[in-house]
Image (cartoon, rainbow, N blue to C red):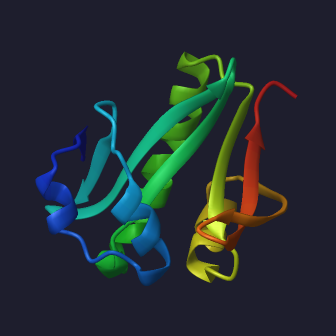
Amino acid sequence: MIRAFWKSDLAKMEIQPEQADEVAAAVIPANAETFLVDKTVVAVIWYEEISPKRFILFAIINKKAGKKLFAFVKALKLIIDNRSRELAAERLEMTVLAGFKAGEQLARMLGFECEGIMRKAYLGKDYKLFAKIYGE
């Protein structure tokens, strides 16, 4: 199930240590959505436009998602492609803390390709840049 994000959703999640800095600094916008599987908050996601037809995807994933993550990934792939078409996106990006294997795996499972490492991109830490290109 997908619904609008509620501030109380974060309290229902165990934040992964690799995402703790981003979550602490995040300003989650009104267009954010919460993914629930069997009443468990699995993730919170949102898009932000960087420039015309270029968007970045943010995702906060519950550390305790476990087996529920498979259903989330399957649904998220469809939603990403549908929203990207609605937005007429040509490029969708996501960044993952370098060395955060679960985050890198999720990006690849969602169809993103790694384009390289952004050194000292946030709080002095390196991040991998993943992108999904539409219309090629």
- Residue 124 in the image: x percent, y percent? 66, 72
Residue 86 left/right relative to 124: left
Residue 68 left/right relative to 79: left
- Residue 1 in the image: x percent, y percent? 24, 47
Q: Is residue 69 above or below residue 136?
A: below
Q: Quadrant of residue 4?
A: top left
Q: Residue at x 64, y 72 (%)?
A: 105
Q: Is residue 121 above or below residue 83?
A: below
Q: Residue at x 30, y 80 (%)?
A: 64
Residue 80 left/right relative to 60: right
Q: Is residue 24 above or below residue 1?
A: below
Residue nearer the viewer, 24 or 102:
24
Q: Residue at x 33, y 71 (%)?
A: 62
Q: Residue at x 88, y 28 (%)?
A: 136
- Residue 36 in the image: x percent, y percent? 24, 56
Q: Quadrant of residue 120?
A: bottom right
